[in-house]
C-alpha cells in the first residue's frame, strides 16, 4: 500500500502547515520567557499597538478630518496586521497556558486558518522593516517631529513597528517563514499598489509621493522595483535572524543539559572507580 501523502497535505506542508500542526508548540513558546510571560507580553504589546491605531484614527477624524483615507496608507494597514497578529498569538498563548501546555485551539482549526495565521506572521516580520526604511529614507522631513503627537505616532508606527517584528523573530520559538510566503507577500504589496492608484482616482491624492508618475517620471518603475527588493531583503533578514536564534537556542539547550548531567556523571564515575577500602582482618 502506498504511503505517499495526499497532494493537499503536501501543498499545505510547503506553506508551513504541518500535520499535525506545530507538534512542538513553537508558536506559543519562547526560548527566553515562560509561556505565561510570553502571553502577557504579546497581549500587552497588542493592546499598545491597538491604542496607537485607534487614537490615530480618532485624531484624524476629529482634528484633521481625513479619516476616510486612513486605511489607504500601507503604514496603517501593516500596523493593523501587527495588532491582529499580536492579539491572535496572545490569545493562543493564553489558551496554551490554560491547557497546561498540552495544546492550543489553532492546532485543531482547519488548515486554511492555520495557513493564514502563519502568513500573517510572515507579513508582520517583514513588512515593518520595509515601512521603516522607506519612511525614514524617503518620506520623513522637518514635520516628522513637529508636535508631541507627530513624534509619538511616527516613533510608534515607523520605528516601534520594526521592534514588534524583532520581538517575534528573536523572542519566540516560531520557525522561519516558508519560502512560498515570499511571493505571496510580494503579491500583496502589488495589490496595495493597485489600492494606491484607486485612492488617487477616487480621492484625488497619492498616498505616497514617490508613486506619482507626473512627478517621478522614469523613477517610478525604479521605486516600485525597489520596494519589491526591499521586501525580499526584509524576508531574508527575518529568516536569517530566526535561524540564528534557533541555533543559539539549541546551543544553550545543550549547554544546560551538560551542566545538569555533568555533576551526576562525575558522581557515577567516582562511585565506580573509587578504590575500595581494604577490609581489616582481626585475628
Image (cartoon, rainbow, N blue to C red):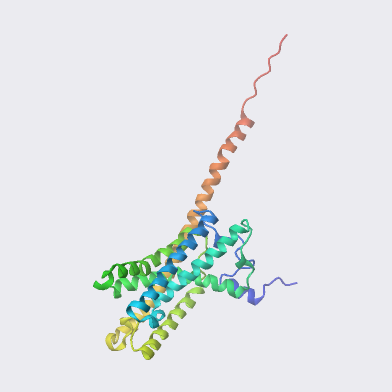
User: What residue do we see at 56% from left, 46% from top?
Assistant: 257
Q: Is 203 above or below relative to 177?
A: below
Q: Residue at the top extreme?
A: 283
Total labels drawn: 0
Asked if residue 242 can be seen in this view, the reply is no
Asked where in the image residue 74 lies, by quadrant, the reply is bottom left
Using the image as rendered, state which of residue 193 and residue 65 is in the foreground: 65
Q: Residue at the right extreme?
A: 1
Q: Residue at the left extreme?
A: 142
- Please state the horizontal and vertical placement of residue 151, each as a whole percent of the image: 30, 67
Using the image as rendered, state which of residue 40 and residue 183 is in the foreground: 40
Asked where in the image residue 218 lies, by quadrant, the reply is bottom left
Q: Quadrant of the C terminus?
A: top right
- Please state the horizontal and vertical placement of residue 176, each as a whole percent of the image: 50, 65
Q: Is 220 above or below relative to 231?
A: below
Asked if residue 276 can be seen in this view, the reply is yes
User: What residue do we see at 31% from left, 71% from top?
Assistant: 136
Q: Is residue 271 left or right of residue 75?
A: right
Q: Is residue 48 left or right of residue 64?
A: right
Q: Quadrant of the N terminus?
A: bottom right
- Please state the horizontal and vertical placement of residue 4, each as a whole percent of the image: 68, 72
Using the image as rendered, state which of residue 181 and residue 148 is in the foreground: 148
Q: Residue at the front extreme?
A: 62
- Please state the horizontal and vertical placement of residue 105, each as a whole percent of the image: 62, 66
Q: Is residue 160 left or right of residue 11?
A: left
Using the image as rendered, state which of residue 266 and residue 190 is in the foreground: 190
Amino acid at each position: 500500500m502506498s504511503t505517499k501523502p495526499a497532494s493537499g497535505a503536501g501543498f499545505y506542508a510547503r506553506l508551513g502547515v504541518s500535520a499535525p500542526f506545530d507538534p512542538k508548540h513553537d508558536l506559543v513558546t519562547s526560548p527566553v520567557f515562560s509561556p505565561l510571560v510570553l502571553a502577557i507580553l504579546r497581549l500587552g504589546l497588542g493592546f499598545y499597538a491597538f491604542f496607537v491605531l485607534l487614537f490615530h484614527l480618532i485624531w484624524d477624524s476629529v482634528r484633521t478630518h481625513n479619516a476616510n483615507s486612513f486605511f489607504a496608507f500601507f503604514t496603517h494597514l501593516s500596523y493593523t496586521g501587527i495588532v491582529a497578529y499580536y492579539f491572535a498569538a496572545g490569545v493562543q498563548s493564553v489558551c496554551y497556558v490554560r491547557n497546561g501546555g498540552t495544546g492550543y485551539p489553532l492546532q485543531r482549526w482547519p488548515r486554511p486558518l492555520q495557513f493564514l495565521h502563519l502568513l500573517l506572521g510572515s507579513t508582520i516580520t517583514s513588512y515593518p522593516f520595509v515601512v521603516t526604511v522607506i519612511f525614514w529614507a524617503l518620506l520623513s522631513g522637518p514635520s516628522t517631529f513637529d508636535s508631541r503627537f507627530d513624534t509619538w505616532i511616527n516613533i510608534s508606527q515607523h520605528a516601534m513597528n520594526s521592534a514588534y517584528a524583532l520581538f517575534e523573530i528573536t523572542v519566540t520559538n516560531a520557525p522561519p517563514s516558508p519560502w512560498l510566503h515570499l511571493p505571496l507577500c510580494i503579491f500583496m504589496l502589488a495589490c496595495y499598489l493597485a489600492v494606491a492608484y484607486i485612492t488617487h482616482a477616487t480621492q484625488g491624492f497619492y498616498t505616497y509621493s514617490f508613486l506619482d508618475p507626473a512627478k517621478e517620471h522614469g523613477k517610478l518603475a525604479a521605486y516600485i522595483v525597489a520596494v519589491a527588493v526591499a521586501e525580499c531583503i526584509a524576508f531574508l533578514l527575518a529568516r536569517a535572524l530566526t535561524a540564528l536564534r534557533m541555533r543559539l537556542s539549541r546551543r544553550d539547550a545543550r549547554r544546560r543539559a551538560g551542566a545538569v548531567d555533568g555533576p551526576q556523571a562525575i558522581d557515577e564515575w567516582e562511585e565506580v572507580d573509587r578504590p575500595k577500602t581494604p577490609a581489616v582482618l582481626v585475628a
